[in-house]
Image (cartoon, coloured by chain):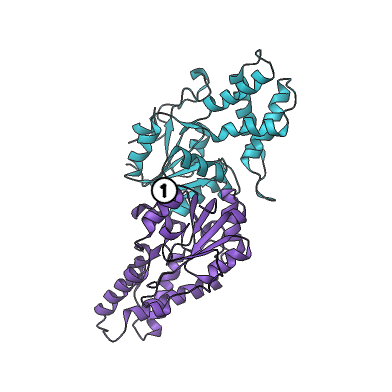
Chain colours: A purple, B cyan
Amino acid sequence: MRFDAYLFDVQGTLLDFYTPVRAAVAEHLSALGRPDIDPGDLTRAWRTDYFTRVSTLDQLSGPWQKVQGQYEAGFAAVAASYGLPAPDAASATRVAASWQRLVPWPDVRDGLAAIRSGALTATLSNTDMATVIGLARRLDLRFDALFTAELFSRFKPDPQVYLGALGFLGIAPQRAALVAAHPYDLDAAAALGLGTVFVARPDEYGDPALAHSAEPGRYTQAVTGIDQIE
Amino acid sequence: MRFDAYLFDVQGTLLDFYTPVRAAVAEHLSALGRPDIDPGDLTRAWRTDYFTRVSTLDQLSGPWQKVQGQYEAGFAAVAASYGLPAPDAASATRVAASWQRLVPWPDVRDGLAAIRSGALTATLSNTDMATVIGLARRLDLRFDALFTAELFSRFKPDPQVYLGALGFLGIAPQRAALVAAHPYDLDAAAALGLGTVFVARPDEYGDPALAHSAEPGRYTQAVTGIDQIE
């Protein structure tokens, strides 16, 4: 391995959220009798809504607001934007629970194990600690440590999240790499001196035309799977 | 399992520190030509010094002071109290590194795996994150999460350490238990409503007469090994 430690983004990078979340959205739309609304489209709007919420949420003052609660609130907002009736609390919770049922991309299990045999591995996710702990357990994915935004009371791309994780590991930025499918995350890590591994996830949003891409040479490495990291 | 989550103290409860630390101390004394000093006695004095340091250290103001650094400073102080020459920095670091080479008590590996098959398992240690991460990795001990005092900028028995860990897990105190060999730790957890499992470790300090004991009925359960927890 080129680095002593690898920090992994989770949603989208290691795990496919589109498939399970779209399925839950499709079920909700079907129950409402709304075949005219594309569940994939609503899923992408929901992801965007979450992204906006996370980037504007002040988590430093007051008690931590769980990300799972943001998904539930966001679902109501996105449903309204599609002209759907306001979901009751139970429906919002049920549909939002799909964000805890993500599935690993096919290269992840073997790829993670191979990297872990030669370097420290840890998550670095904006999702709740309880969600990451639950996903790692249910999916039997093994890391040396689980780090999330919640530990630092701020979200990526805040520098304290990356530097805080490295502080816990006792590793200098130059000896660590962030692995992510999202340029905003990699760019923030690069600015702090970490190595960067871009992972192409053409199906992240259900349509390769919508997937993120990396400028050639911009990152330490660009791969098409975790098992390609060298 | 009786609880949804088990939090484990590490040093002394899951891992034997006396054997590796005493060996490092003995080597140091031997190099100094001091067979008159009992390495076990000095090891116990060092542990006590650490305990005093941790209970008086203000970790809320300023950058976190690594516990490993406290061991190194403590070794110099304890050496002086035995009339030994001040260790140079390299010697103090070498001897203090023994605190990162702890070994599991014989019941721990199978016991942890059995509990983890039915409940969430996590460490809750006053030792540094990097130390707990390194120990779990080298000893191949699997937990669902690794929590330490460092995450909360305060040490046990501060209530925020126990409650913070439960907050990350999303588990109510009544649904969790602390597993420890030390009454001070269990009493603090009990005061917050957690269940308590006392583990007898007769060899923790190298002499059963020095080991902690539990008043009958004081804790939810009292066991002689992690594999006895029910």
| Picture quadrant of residue B1 | top left
Residue for point 56% across, 70% down: A218
State the residue in front, B50 or B38: B38
Disc 1: which residue: B144
Total residue callouts: 1
Residue A175 vertical position relative to residue B107 in the rendered view, above or below: below
Quadrant in the picture for residue A155? bottom right
Q: Give me the chain letter of mark 1.
A: B
Q: Is residue B63 left or right of residue A132?
A: right
Quadrant housing residue A102? bottom left
Taking depth in this image into account, of A89 and A223 the one nearest to the observer is A223
Q: Position of residue A135 (x, y in %)?
A: 38, 57
Report x, y in % for residue A214. Answer: 51, 72
Nearest the camera: B28 or A24? Answer: B28
Q: Is residue A119 visible?
A: yes
| Residue B183: x %, y % from top left | 50, 32
In the picture as drawn, the residue positioned furthest to the top comes out as B36
Mark 1 neighbour class, 10 Å CA radius: few under 14, some 14 to 19, many 20 or more: many
Say what secondary structure mark 1 lies in.
loop
The amino acid type found where label 1 is placed reads: Asp
State the residue in front, B61 or B144: B144
Instruction: Locate residue B104 relative to residue B23 in the image: left or right.
Output: left
Q: Residue at x 53, y 52 (%)?
A: A5
Residue A45 can be seen, yes or no: no
Q: Is residue B93 left or right of residue A80?
A: right
> Residue A122: where, in percent of width, then height?
49, 53
Whether B86 is drawn above or below A118: the answer is above
